[in-house]
Amino acid sequence: MADDEKQIRDLIERWAKAVHEGDMDGVLDAHADDIVMYDVPPPDDGIRGIERYRASWPPFFDWQRQGACFEIVSLDVTAGADVAFAHALLRCGTEQELREDPANRLRMTIGLRKENGRWTVSHEHHSFPHKDLGPGDQEK
């Protein structure tokens, strides 16, 4: 499994680099046609399918060109024979946003499946912590 974990780590690092560079082909590489993504901006019920996934990125690239960063801080990968998941924390924000809240991290979970010997991203979930709630304020 160590080789699979390395392949997945490399795939995610290439993807993050492509996101940072605004490289659409790199962002789409190794993503399943039936990808499901739950992202920070709407729609709240997620994005389904590679075409909707593709369409979701240009506004992010536009925002990022204003000086925002997108970089992996930590990445953990767990791989089975034909399914795997990874979770990561990323610095994602403009210089001002990160100055005002330097510890803020984008949280990301990725689900993958092995198809024809190649790892493919089938699920992504991106979120930021909700800063308005304290530990005792959350509904149980």
Image (cartoon, rainbow, N blue to C red):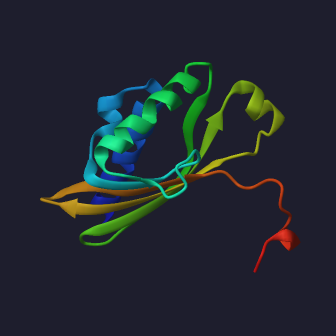
The tally of labels here is 0
Q: Is residue 92 left or right of residue 101?
A: left
Q: Is residue 117 left or right of residue 48?
A: left
User: Residue reaching furthest left?
Assistant: 116
Q: Nearer the viewer, residue 56 or 127?
A: 56
User: Residue reaching furthest bottom?
Assistant: 140
Residue 27 placed where, x, y %?
A: 36, 37
Residue 124 placed where, x, y %?
A: 44, 55
Which quarter shows the C terminus?
Answer: bottom right
Reply above or below: 79 against 23.
Answer: below
Q: Nearer the viewer, residue 47 or 30?
A: 47
Q: Is residue 9 left or right of residue 76?
A: left
Q: Looking at the image, which residue is at 74% across and 34% down?
A: 98
Reply above or below: 124 against 137.
Answer: above
Which quarter shows the N terminus?
Answer: bottom left
Can the viewer see residue 14 in this picture? no
Residue 78 placed where, x, y %?
A: 41, 67
Q: Is residue 27 left or right of residue 44?
A: left
Classify residue 16 by image quadrant. top left
User: Residue reaching furthest top?
Assistant: 66
Q: Looking at the image, which residue is at 80% across and 40% down?
A: 101
Q: Nearer the viewer, residue 1 or 135?
A: 135
Residue 122 placed where, x, y %?
A: 33, 58
Can the viewer see residue 52 in this picture? yes
Q: Nearer the viewer, residue 41 or 74?
A: 41
Q: Looking at the image, which residue is at 12% across and 59% down?
A: 116
Q: Looking at the image, which residue is at 45% across and 28% down?
A: 58
Classify residue 55 by image quadrant. top left
